[in-house]
Image: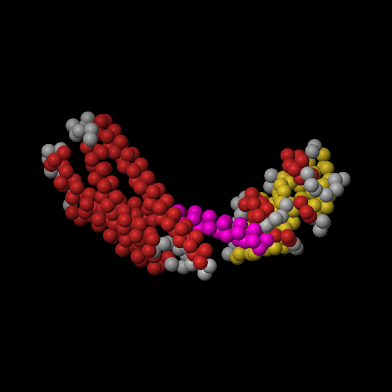
C-alpha cells in the first residue's frame, strides 16, 4: 500500500494493513486445514481400497505432522508478506526477498515434519519411520511441494491487501464526494476528479461505466451503483431511468413516452437517454415536464 501524507489517511492505511495481514493469515490457515482434512481422508480411502493393514489413524498422523510443521513455519510467511509486499514497482526486490523467505519456510517445515515423524512413529505405530527415498530426493520433492504452498499463501496475502486497498479507495472517494462535491473516477491509468454538478448521465458497460460530465465522456472502472452512491454523497439527485442508465434529475428537461410504458429522457443540453417502465414512477417523481 502507498504512504499518504495525511496523518488520518496514514492511520487508516495502517489499520487496513493490519486487517489484510490478519485476514490473509486466517484464510491461509483455513485453506491449510481444509487441505489437511481432504488429504487425510483421501489417503484413508486409498488404504481401505488396497486392504492396507495400517491403523485408521495413520493418514491423520501422517498429514498432521505436516500441518504442525506448517503452523510452526507459518510466521516466516507472515514476516515476508509484511516486510516485502508484492506491489507494482517493487516486484524485483520483493521476489528476491521471497526466495529467501521460501528457503526459510521450507527449511523449517520439512525439518520439523521429518523430526516429528521420526520421533512419533516408534511411539504411535511401534516401528521406525521410513520415507523411502534418498535424502536428495526427499529434499527436492518436499521443497517443490512447499514452494507451491508458499506461493499460494503469498497470493492470498496479496488478495487480502488488494481488497483492503479497494476499500480505502472507495472510502476516500466517498469522503471527497461528500466534502468537496467532486467525483473520483479511474479511467485507464489516469484518475479524474470531476465536479459532481457537471454530471449528466451514465451508462453501464460491462465492468465499466460511460459517464458524461459536461461535454466529456469518461469510461471509468466503477459500477453504476457505486457511481450513484458517490453522486448522492455529493448532493446530486442521481436517479435510475433504466437498469443500465443513470441520469441527473436536475438536468432532465422532459420525459417522452415511447410506447408500452417505456420513455425517452431528454436532458437540458439536448442529449437523450432511454428509460424503462420499471423505473418510470421513480423517474417522474420530481422530474421536469412530461410530454
Q: For this view, does 66 lie left or right of residue 87? A: left
Residue 178 rendering spot, x and y as whole percentages: 64, 58
Dividing the picture into quadrants, the one containing residue 19 is bottom left
Q: Which residue is rendered at x = 85% and y = 45% of the image? A: 290
Q: For this view, does 7 lie left or right of residue 230? A: left
Can residue 62 be seen here? The reply is yes
Q: Which residue is rendered at x = 28% and y = 60% of the image? A: 103
Based on the picture, tell me whether residue 103 belongs to the magenta stretch: no
In the picture as drawn, the residue positioned furthest to the bottom comes out as 5
Q: Which residue is rendered at x = 41% and y = 55% of the image? A: 21
Residue 26 rendering spot, x and y as whole percentages: 39, 48
In the picture as drawn, the residue positioned furthest to the front comes out as 8
Residue 201 rendering spot, x and y as whole percentages: 73, 54
Q: Which residue is rendered at x = 34% and y = 51% of the image? A: 149
Can residue 187 be seen here? The reply is no
Give above or below for 11 relative to 250.
below
Based on the picture, tell me whether residue 166 belongs to the magenta stretch: yes
Give the tally of numbered discs: 0
Q: Compare residues 75 and 9 and report the one nearer the observer.
A: 9
Q: Compare residues 98 and 192 and report the one nearer the observer.
A: 192
Dividing the picture into quadrants, the one containing residue 96 is bottom left
What main secondary structure does the magenta stretch of the protein show? helix
Dividing the picture into quadrants, the one containing residue 125 is top left
What stretch of residues is rendered in magenta? Answer: 160-187
Residue 264 rendering spot, x and y as whole percentages: 80, 47
Amino acid at each position: 500500500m502507498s504512504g499518504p501524507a495525511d496523518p488520518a489517511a496514514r492511520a487508516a492505511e495502517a489499520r487496513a494493513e493490519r486487517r489484510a495481514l490478519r485476514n490473509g493469515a486466517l484464510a491461509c490457515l483455513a485453506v491449510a486445514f481444509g487441505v489437511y482434512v481432504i488429504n487425510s481422508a483421501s489417503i484413508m480411502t486409498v488404504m481401505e481400497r488396497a486392504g492396507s493393514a495400517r491403523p485408521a489413524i495413520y493418514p491423520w498422523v501422517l498429514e498432521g505432522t505436516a500441518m504442525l510443521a506448517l503452523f510452526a513455519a507459518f510466521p516466516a510467511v507472515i514476516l515476508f508478506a509484511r516486510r516485502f509486499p508484492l506491489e507494482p514497482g517493487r516486484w524485483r526486490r520483493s521476489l528476491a526477498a521471497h526466495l529467501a523467505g521460501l528457503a526459510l519456510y521450507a527449511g523449517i517445515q520439512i525439518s520439523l515434519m521429518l523430526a516429528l515423524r521420526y520421533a512419533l512413529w516408534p511411539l504411535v505405530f511401534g516401528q521406525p519411520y521410513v520415507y523411502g527415498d534418498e535424502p536428495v530426493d526427499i529434499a527436492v520433492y518436499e521443497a517443490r511441494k512447499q514452494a507451491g504452498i508458499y506461493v499460494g499463501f503469498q497470493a492470498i496475502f496479496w488478495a487480502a491487501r488488494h481488497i483492503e486497498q479497494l476499500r480505502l479507495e472507495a472510502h476516500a472517494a466517498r469522503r471527497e464526494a461528500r466534502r468537496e462535491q467532486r467525483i473520483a473516477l479511474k479511467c485507464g491509468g489516469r484518475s479524474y476528479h470531476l465536479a459532481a454538478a457537471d454530471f449528466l448521465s451514465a451508462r453501464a458497460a460491462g465492468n465499466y461505466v460511460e459517464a458524461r460530465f459536461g461535454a466529456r465522456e469518461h469510461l471509468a472502472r466503477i459500477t453504476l451503483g457505486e457511481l450513484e452512491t458517490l453522486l448522492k454523497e455529493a448532493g446530486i439527485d442521481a436517479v435510475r431511468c433504466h437498469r443500465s442508465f443513470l441520469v441527473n434529475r436536475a438536468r432532465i428537461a422532459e420525459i417522452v413516452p415511447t410506447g408500452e410504458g417505456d420513455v425517452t429522457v431528454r436532458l437540458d443540453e439536448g442529449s437523450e437517454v432511454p428509460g424503462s417502465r420499471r423505473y418510470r414512477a421513480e423517474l417522474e417523481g420530481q422530474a421536469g415536464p412530461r410530454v
